[in-house]
Amino acid sequence: MKRIAFVLVAMVAAWSAAVRADETCMSPYMPKITGQEDWVYVWTLGVDGVGDGSDKLVTIGANPKDAATYGKVVSSVSVGGRHEAHHAGFSEDRRHLWAGGEAGQIYQIDASGAVKSMTTLGGFNAGIAFSPLDHALYVCNTKLGLFRVDADGGHALFAAEADGHKMVCPNYPVFDRHGRLYVSDSGKWKQDNGFLLRFDERGSGQVIGGPFGYANGLALSADERWLFMVESDTDRVYRFALTSDCPLGPGEVYADSVGRLPDGLALDEAGNLYVACYASDEIWRISPSGEKTLLAWDYHAILLSRPTNLAWGGANLDVLYVANLGRDTITRASLPGVRGQRLAHQY
């Protein structure tokens, strides 16, 4: 069984020919990058007795052609509190970085590093996704429901129920290229009240599957014929057929005994499914034939520390970004020869 270890050395990664990795707060949801990046944005956590004790958005020069800024901190802006942004994503024009805080905050950061608090939703912000239709940010708020957030910070509750089913714990959203939004409603742990929901662009929803155990991460195949779903409390990944005749066709156990508490999913362009396992600090890769490979594991829980969600970025979509809830960081790993599958808003 092939294993790839993540190693952290200060702010620079040690790497082999197989993989290189470092720890950063770059977005795990950003669109495809082309060309040289100028800046890296890092969210740092506040500590009592250090400065004002607040979280900060730090901007670091990333372009080696600019000797004056390369590898140097060019900006550090306090956000005036401790909010631990767990997820972030760039707008379509990539002029602003958006981040969600654990108390429901939505921040917008411009190219100069200035931080603006756009709004506060309340509750806890879980998964986010950009719509391929209106390019707005859709946020799963585990307490209140699904929110739509515009570029100016204006927001509205998009949905709190689907066809009479009130969402218990909306967790992860994924759009198809027609703008239909699939959402996992996790329910409560070990109570077998998780469901799969689907919403149209107006916020009208229906329950398309369930009850399940703790329904969690979702992923759509490139041809949008298959929907993958994690059931966290059984360590399983399911696969459901999607047809024109039925919003959710027959399902099957796609993989069993996938680490401990599998959480988030991502696909590469070859159809391999990557699974972040929260309780075992692992990433597993499942081939289209069903073969499981332990891709990464962090014994010390430094770079992989309660990993939740995954997404692909980099100029060639060959960098895997992993969100770590245990350290409130994003880890990235370069996987030579592997390219990620684009999301609906990246076409």
Image (spheres, rainbow, N blue to C red):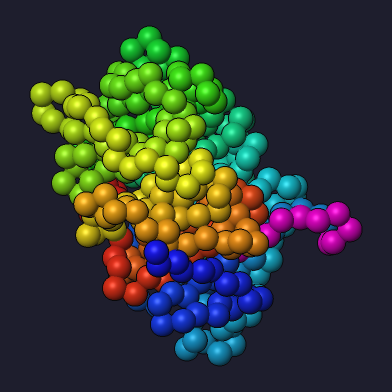
Q: Residue furthest front?
A: 1
Position of the C terminus, as image quadrant, is: bottom left
Position of the N terminus, as image quadrant, is: bottom left
Q: Residue at x 33, y 42 (%)?
A: 255
Query: Could you tell me residue 325's position as x and y percent?
Result: 60, 48
Instruction: Give the camera-side residue of 249 and 107.
Output: 249
Q: Residue at x 41, y 71 (%)?
A: 334
Name which quarter of the figure residue 7 lies in.
bottom right
Q: Residue at x 41, y 17 (%)?
A: 161
Query: Could you tell me residue 204's position as x and y percent?
Result: 31, 20
Residue 91, visible in the rendered structure: no
Which residues are the magenta region?
40-51
Instruction: Give the camera-side residue of 100 and 135.
Output: 100
Query: Could you tell me residue 293's position as x and y percent?
Result: 37, 58
Q: Residue at x 42, y 59 (%)?
A: 294
Name which quarter of the figure residue 226 lies in.
top left
Q: Residue furthest right?
A: 49
Name which quarter of the figure residue 257 lies in.
top left
* In the rendered image, the vertical position of residue 314 relative to residue 71, given as above or below: above
* Residue 31 sits inside the magenta stretch: no
Query: Could you tell me residue 18's position as x and y percent?
Result: 40, 77
Is 49 on the left-hand or right-hand side of 137?
right
